Image: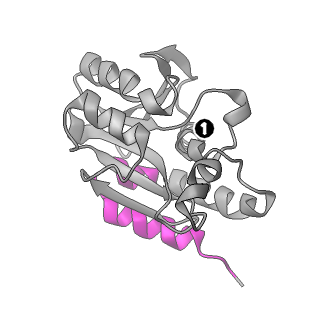
Amino acid sequence: MLLWVGLGNPEPSQARHRHNIGFMALDVIARRHGFSPWRKRFKGEVAEGMLGGQKVLALKPLTYMNLSGEAVQPAAAFTKIPPKAITVFHDELDLAPGKVRVKLGGGVAGHNGLRDIQRALATPDYWRVRLGIGHPGHKDRVHGHVLGNFASVDAPWVERLLDAVADAAPRLAEGKAEEFMTRVALLTQETP
């Protein structure tokens, strides 16, 4: 079994924030692949489904971003899922809008959700799907940028990205991170 975690904040008013792109990604994956309805569990919402021959437990922590580990750790402990079978979908300032990178382990680059998960799991060795939201240009504008809604001009690339991630999700579940990234890149290319 795999544990896929989408990061975000639970308030309805924050649903379209750039910081919530992890929630958005899991919603589209679950809908596209016929996961069970979302239900409350592990200080979050969970849905279950099959991807690439693997059972996947999708988790959206309702603890707010900075306490994401309070949902991830009990979910992983209860289901006996080791850190290397956990994948976290999150916003990434250091990637251009619409770009995706997958990596195992590493630093948290100032991301408080990742920091709390790393604290709760006592290891950095879990997978991350970094969903590019772009950088606002100056560090003083980061807070407002991540906690701001996607602009209407962003809608086409955000929709393309989320659809591509959902389309390629079975490859990720099969452990084929490179194929996943290649497929997402192909599907998100703008056509003239």
Element marked by disc 1:
helix
User: In the visual, does 122 lie left or right of 61?
Assistant: left
Residue toward you, 124 or 88: 124
Specify the quadrant of the image occupied by residue 78. top left
Residue 133 appears in the picture as rendered: yes
Q: Residue furthest front?
A: 140
Q: Quadrant of the C terminus?
A: bottom right
Q: Which residues are magenta?
A: 169-191
Q: Is residue 8 magenta?
A: no
Q: Position of residue 164 (x, y in %)?
A: 56, 59
Give the vertical position of 138 relative to 67 (above or below).
Answer: below
Q: Quadrant of the N terminus?
A: top left
Q: Position of residue 167 (x, y in %)?
A: 53, 55
The residue depicted at 38 percent of the width and 34 percent of the height is: 56
Q: Residue furthest right?
A: 152
The residue depicted at 46 percent of the width and 67 percent of the height is: 183
The residue depicted at 33 percent of the width and 34 percent of the height is: 117
Q: Position of residue 145 (x, y in %)?
A: 63, 53
Specify the quadrant of the image occupied by residue 57. top left
User: In the visual, does 100 lie left or right of 133?
Assistant: left
Q: Position of residue 129 (x, y in %)?
A: 40, 52
Figure colour scheme:
one colour
User: In the visual, does 71 lie left or right of 17?
Assistant: left
Give the vertical position of 32 relative to 47 (above or below).
Answer: below
Q: Which residue is mark 1?
A: 31
Residue toward you, 146 or 48: 146
Report the magenta stretch's main SS: helix
**Three-letter code for the amino acid on which mark 1 is drawn:** Arg
